[in-house]
């Protein structure tokens, strides 16, 4: 089967000012299959967000290119949605109004968009909170609103930048399980960035490990395990060891 996303020889130097440029990515070359959850794993500052921004069309590579659905990416595309590292809900809109936002932009009528939004609010277990404002929700609940808002517009690809960063271990585990359920139901192509080995092992079909700056591909690992994946699963341990050995921990 043809792959959906091709990243071809992407290099990126952030030009700050003379002599202070940051060489962020070095010859990154890989492809992503339709329907897979592809995880990009690497230490802070290794260029993960830079790579995601290039794939989603928010930044241009210094050289190389990204091809999605047979077309070179030159600008953001509404069919490829990004959930940013600093996810931002609209503080003046309720949960329901946040989730309907993208549908409103698409011109979907009020009743229909509210029905779609309610389906996703239910999926992330926020029924009963439709009329609350973001400031009335916990951090984990706000992230779930952001996930519902992302799914509601039915994008072809979802780019997620550290969607669970800063959440406590319980909330994180619950949200990972929710994402697994959603994946099983919706079969989306997801590119997920994380520096958390457990998150990568819980969710990914494949894990791409980037080295520290400039980000180079160290390895792409297949995670051929059924979900949900228990930490004690004997087949998980060797994969975890393989990842840790790449970080020399
Ligand atoms: N707009 C920019 N201008 C200049 N330098 C930048 C810019 N964006 C990122 N960088 C630099 O590029 C490098 C990679 O940054 P990036 O944000 O991609 O890392 P990251 O892997 O996402 O890190 P984290 O896990 O902390 O989010 C860093 O050294 C950073 O300082
Ligand atoms: Mg980042």
Image (tube, rainbow, N blue to C red):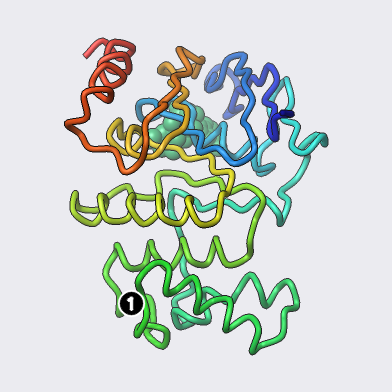
Q: Is residue 103 left or right of residue 191?
A: right
Mark 1 C-beta to ligand 1 under 8 Å: no
At x 45%, y 58%, the residue is 87
Q: Residues within 10 Å of mark 1 (few under 14, many from 20)?
A: few
Ligand 2 quadrant in view: top left
Position in image of residue 249 (x %, y %): 21, 14
Could you say which is closer to the camera, residue 99 or residue 111? 111
At x 66%, y 44%, the residue is 58
Position in image of residue 75 (x %, y %): 75, 45
Could you say which is closer to the camera, residue 166 or residue 202? 202
Q: Which residue is mark 1?
A: 135
Q: Is residue 98 left or right of residue 195?
A: right
- SS under mark 1: helix
Q: Is residue 161 left or right of residue 36?
A: left
Position in image of residue 99 (x %, y %): 53, 73
Placement of 64 over or under 121, stated as above or below = above
Q: Quadrant of the N terminus?
A: top right
Question: Looking at this rendering, what residue extends furthest in the right direction?
Answer: 71
At x 51%, y 15%, the residue is 216
């Amino acid at each position: 089967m043809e792959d959906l996303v091709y990243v071809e020889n992407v290099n990126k130097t952030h030009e700050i000012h003379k002599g202070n440029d940051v060489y962020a990515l070095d010859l990154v070359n890989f492809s992503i299959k339709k329907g897979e959850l592809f995880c990009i794993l690497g230490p802070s500052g290794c260029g993960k967000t830079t790579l995601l921004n290039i794939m989603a069309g928010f930044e241009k590579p210094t050289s190389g290119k990204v091809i999605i659905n047979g077309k070179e990416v030159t600008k953001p595309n509404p069919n490829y949605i990004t959930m940013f590292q600093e996810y931002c809900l609209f503080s003046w809109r309720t949960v329901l109004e946040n989730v309907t936002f993208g549908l409103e932009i698409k011109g979907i009528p009020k009743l229909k968009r509210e029905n779609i939004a309610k389906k996703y609010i239910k999926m992330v277990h926020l029924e009963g909170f439709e009329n609350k404002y973001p400031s009335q929700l916990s951090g984990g609940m706000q992230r779930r609103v952001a996930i519902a808002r992302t799914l509601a517009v039915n994008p072809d690809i979802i780019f997620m930048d550290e969607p669970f960063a800063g959440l406590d271990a319980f909330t994180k585990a619950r949200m990972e399980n929710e994402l697994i359920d959603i994946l099983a139901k919706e079969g989306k192509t997801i590119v997920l960035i994380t520096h958390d080995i457990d998150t990568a092992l819980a969710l990914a079909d494949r894990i791409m490990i980037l080295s520290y700056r400039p980000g180079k591909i160290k390895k792409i690992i297949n995670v051929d395990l059924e979900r949900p994946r228990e930490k004690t699963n004997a087949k998980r341990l060797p994969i975890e060891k393989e990842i840790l050995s790449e970080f020399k921990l």
